[in-house]
Image: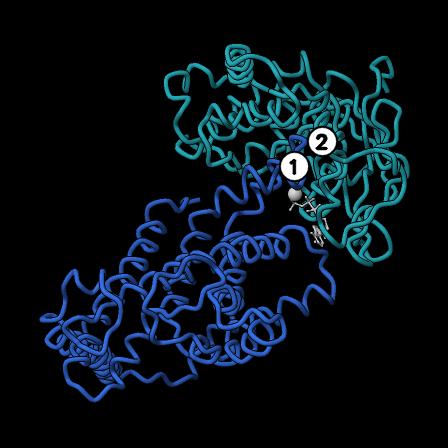
Amino acid sequence: MDNNHNTVLETKNLNIYYGDFLAIKDVNFKVFRHQITAIIGPSGCGKSTLLRSFNRMNELVPSARSEGKILFNGEDIYDPSIDPVEVRRRIGMVFQKPNPFPKSIYENIAWGLKINGFRGSKSELDDLVEQALRGAALWDEVKDKLDQSGLSLSGGQQQRLCIARAIAIKPEVILMDEPASALDPIATLKIEDLMRELKENYTIVIVTHNMQEAARVSDYTAMMMLTGDEERSGTVIEFDQTNVIFTRPKDKRTEDYITGRFG
Amino acid sequence: MSTLTALKDVTFERNLSFRKLKGKIFEILAFFAILLGIAMLLTLLVDVFLDGLPWLSTRLFTEFPSRFPEKAGLRSALQGSIWLMFLTALMAIPVGVGAGIYLEEFAPQNRITRFIEINVANLAGVPSIIYGLLGLGLFVRQLGLGRTLIAGAMTMALLVLPIIIVTTREAIRAVPNSIRQAALAIGATDWEVSRDHVLVYSAPAILTGVILAMSRAIGETAPLITIGALTYIAFDPKGPFDIFTVLPIQIFNWVSLPQPAFHGLAAAGIIILLIVLLSMNALAIWLRNRLTIHW
Ligand SMILES: Nc1ncnc2c1ncn2[C@@H]1O[C@H](COP(=O)(O)OP(=O)(O)OP(=O)(O)O)[C@@H](O)[C@H]1O
Ligand SMILES: [Mg+2]
């Protein structure tokens, strides 16, 4: 495996429980800087659970509990001294269903900047909002209606607004949970193009059910599968460069899944 | 395949016209039920208006109650109602909305929280006279506040508190969780999420609930009679520690007098009370339709 890239996120023997139920078990894998890492696998194998644990969103589920470590630039984000709010500022997230605030398009971006301590002038704020919207390839479509509600946009535009909102506060990593699953093929391609551009400045982890999408955009792929005695806990069964996973997977289960012979 | 063959053995009731007839009968019954309700309301309104209209004049707003119907007015009762409303709102809104927010957004999900939640819901159903007895025992006697506006307002605040808490919680619950997650995911604290999102988006519905709670308080009579709000007040209440009367009590007092002229005055008072109540409810409905966010 190519080890030249430097590691941003790394899980060590990560277990996550919901109550007594072990949802993901003994996950060990790495996310490299300025690369797109895809997490694929059948429904219910714990992809979202794993993704949400990277920015400590999973602990918002009251019954959720974790064991093991997640290192972010070498530092354990589950260390008691670490504030989850700080983790989430540096590791952003885009959700499966677009969830813009019912505020103006402008405010959707500006709010995140303000709460994270932006104290500049109005014109500086305007610039940052524009920058974020350009970064999410949305500026041209909304520049004349920044005061309209974010909810007035189309689904694909809303999702790009959410991406703009995430990149506005300059996180190092952006987590995306099936960001295109609610979109039509054209909007999906737009989001994929966008991801390729974003990877210049950000590290991206994306969960997807769409094999072509994983093959098209990602550099690395983690294959998750249910394992264990009763096949109830998910784990990463194979992690490698995307072209390796898709052309010569080592695990038979990966091959079956990718070629559609799974289940 | 097997389910298909199984279906064949079942005999269906094919009598469609009979089924439609049953639906029709139910529809007619329901229509009469609503007609009955509206007819009774109309009769009441017409009756009140016939009795009260001749007595409706600005004198009602400027004169104190009097033994002579031509000189009697609602001045002290109106001022008492306004004072009571103001003081009740001042106490009940911050506490009620605050408790609602706490229970929905911050309280740990444990047995104590659930116990509190269930009891708040139960309190909303307690008869208002019980609050009157509590107010009499606790505020009027124990705290020595006497039969003052503040004692009345504290009693009323207790009465509307559960309503405000319950409607606040419902309003907050209507804000989708995805919005909280969106805000948390860009590094917001719980308080920032509540302040800039949850509260802002649920404010119209909370306000609606608060107005409805206040209109309940304006019409309530029993608890105030229990704590002994006086009926004959011939001065303007100057502050929270003055004795007082309110609209419904003054109306009640006039109705119980033998002279028919006072019954006309009472009807005029009812018209004013109805106008106040209906405008508050209309405002609440308007707010709800106008400002509610459609997710
Ligand atoms: N909030 C929760 N409470 C309890 N169990 C949960 C919760 N969220 C997920 N689970 C369980 O954890 C397991 C993994 O769920 P997860 O949502 O991570 O799967 P996924 O791979 O993202 O599935 P999908 O592809 O359908 O989105 C499932 O068995 C699920 O039932
Ligand atoms: Mg998922």
Badge 2: chain ID? A
Q: Inspect the image, locate mark 1, and give the three-letter code of the amino acid beneath it.
A: Leu
Residue B216 seen in the current view: yes
Residue B153 point in image, percent of width and height: 48, 64
User: Is B134 on the left or on the right of B224, as rendered?
Assistant: right
User: Is A2 on the left or on the right of B66, as rendered?
Assistant: right
The local secondary structure at tag 2 comes to: helix
Given residues B251 and A169, the one toward you in this image is B251
The image quadrant in which ligand 2 is located = top right
Residue A2 point in image, percent of width and height: 85, 16
Q: Are marks 2 and 1 in contact (CB under 8 Å)?
A: yes
From the image, state the color of chain A. Answer: cyan
Q: Which chain is blue?
A: B
User: Vertical placement of A245 versus B17: above or below?
Assistant: above
Badge 1: chain ID? B
Residue at disc 2, CB closer than 8 Å to ligand 1: no
User: Is B107 on the left or on the right of B65, as rendered?
Assistant: right
Given residues A122 and B66, the one toward you in this image is B66
- Badge 2 crowding class, 10 Å Cα cut-off, few under 14, some 14 to 19, many 20 or more, is many
The reply to the same-chain question for discs 2 and 1 is: no
Give the residue pinned by disc 2: A88
